[in-house]
Amino acid sequence: MPASRPLRVLFLSSEVVPFAKTGGLADVSGALPKALAARNIDVRVVMPLYAGMQWNLLAPLDGIVNVPMWWGNARTAIRLGTLPGSAVPIYFLEFNRYFDRPYLYGPPGQGYPDNFERFSFLSRAALELVKAVDFLPDVIHCNDWQTALAPVYVNTVEWGKPLHACASVYTIHNLAYQGVGDPGALFITGLGREHMNSGEFEHFGAMNLTKAALRHSTMLSTVSPTYANEIQTGAYGFGLDGVLAARKADLQGILNGIDTDEWSPETDPMIPAHFSVARPAGKAACKAALQKEAGLPVDPKIPLFAVVGRLTEQKGFDVLAHALDRVLGWNVQLVLLGSGDPEAEQFFTALGAQRGDKIRAWIGFDNARAHRIEAGADFFVMPSRFEPCGLNQMYSLRYGTLPIVRATGGLVDTVANYDEATGGGTGFVFQDLTKDALANTIGWAVSTYCDRPQHIAAMRKRAMQQDFSWGRAAAAYEALYREAYQRRRGHPFASA
């Protein structure tokens, strides 16, 4: 018997594009719900109302939601908007004490000291909100440590109440961030000391919100199939590999998608010339324009490499810095756009000043320039130590810019290594994160560019034909939601 209503999903996130963003979580949270709605899923998004948002464009709802906190009831107002380009409702929790601040999580390099309290509120308030608006979800989809308490609350404070029937899905976007703190802070969650045990919050003597979510959620997911396997090992599990391995049967890796409307070389308003698989000529014009913008010699014969991203150890930019000793000795060019570790910013800025004929470094972030770089470069370098999914390599493939990536996480799942014998593949993949391995792979790309241009042309065409749309990911998430529902309720959703 078919269901008489759509599947209902509450999507809970601390950041959502275009309202607030610090990383890839926001991109997922802004795109996936729209793709789910296109599959006839009744999805509602909840996030905080941060400083700097256009509050006047959001409709205030009548009434106040009371949120139980350790210190008493927090009276929060609610504002309602929609995800741009869709009818997906997004509810904003208006509580200035926690969210009217200059930063989402804290100043660069540090977190606000009351972050546990702020995001305990987010999880608890989301559950109180759905009661207030009479939306009983079938599945609550939580994302990273900031929403880790929602599955715990469903199993504890909501025990025996309507919300206890909700299945929960917890998605790991980056396991390096877990919400770890002093065990004495458990009282902030509103839960009793009995929950500070090795089966819930306690982890090597500390309180770990992610561990509690891993234990309490109906199903688990992460943002690529390879990363799902990697986080079950000591090398990538950040101390939670044993917990994740114990729930291997409940963990799925679903590759993120990208916004194929925003990132389209055929229609992108930010690039100087449009191009496609059928009409590739515009890419050469984009390359020439990028070389000119960077102050580099405008020469189509020189291979142009690009880097866009956070200048952090995770991204392997320290290894790239050492590899450039060799690489800049060749007839190549490099453009870099990013910000992050002050030492890395200083290094690349200084190198650009010294070797302005070969490298240009732009410190900071400029979305339009990022588009021009993706469109104009020949190759895109991502030497990540770990990469749960990665988006830039998918942007690059879409623009026929061949990625050079380390074999980790989502990079493995999206880039097929070049086969010199057949010309197959969509990029260049290396295993060991060393300066020599990276330099050798860049050298391999250079020799292919110069000696086998027909292979480069074929790889570009193949790369641009890859499907990284959110529709594919949304179908996989719907299947995951239905599995979680069946496990929670004991019967499939179709019989509800």
Image (cartoon, rainbow, N blue to C red):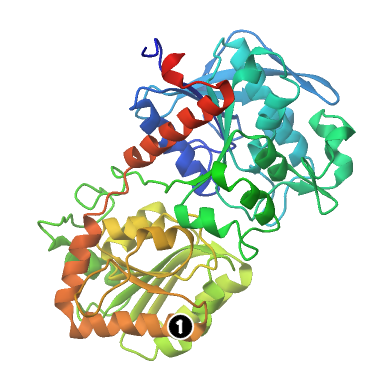
| Residue drawn at (44%, 46%) of the image | 254
For the N terminus, the image quarter is top left
* Coordinates of residue 6 in the picture (x, y in percent): 40, 17
Q: Nearer the viewer, residue 186 or 277?
A: 186
Residue 225 placement, left or right of 191: left
Q: Residue at x 50, y 83 (%)?
A: 435
Residue 182 in view of the camera:
yes
Callout count: 1
The image shows residue 36 at horizontal and vertical percentages of 39, 30
Q: Where 200 sits versus 381, above or below?
A: above
Considering every residue shown, the one lying at the far left of the view is 278
Q: List x then y, in percent, for residue 75.
A: 73, 17
Q: Residues within 10 Å of mark 1 (few under 14, many from 20)?
A: some
Check the image and report above or below for 443 versus 345: below
Residue 77 visible in image: no
Look at the numbered disc 1 and give the secondary structure of its residue: helix
Residue 415 appears at what percent x and percent y? 35, 63
The residue that mark 1 highlights is 437
In this rendering, the answer to whether 1 lies above or below 212 is above
Q: Amino acid at mark 1?
A: Ala
Q: Residue at coordinates 29% horizontally, 82% vertically from top-left?
A: 446
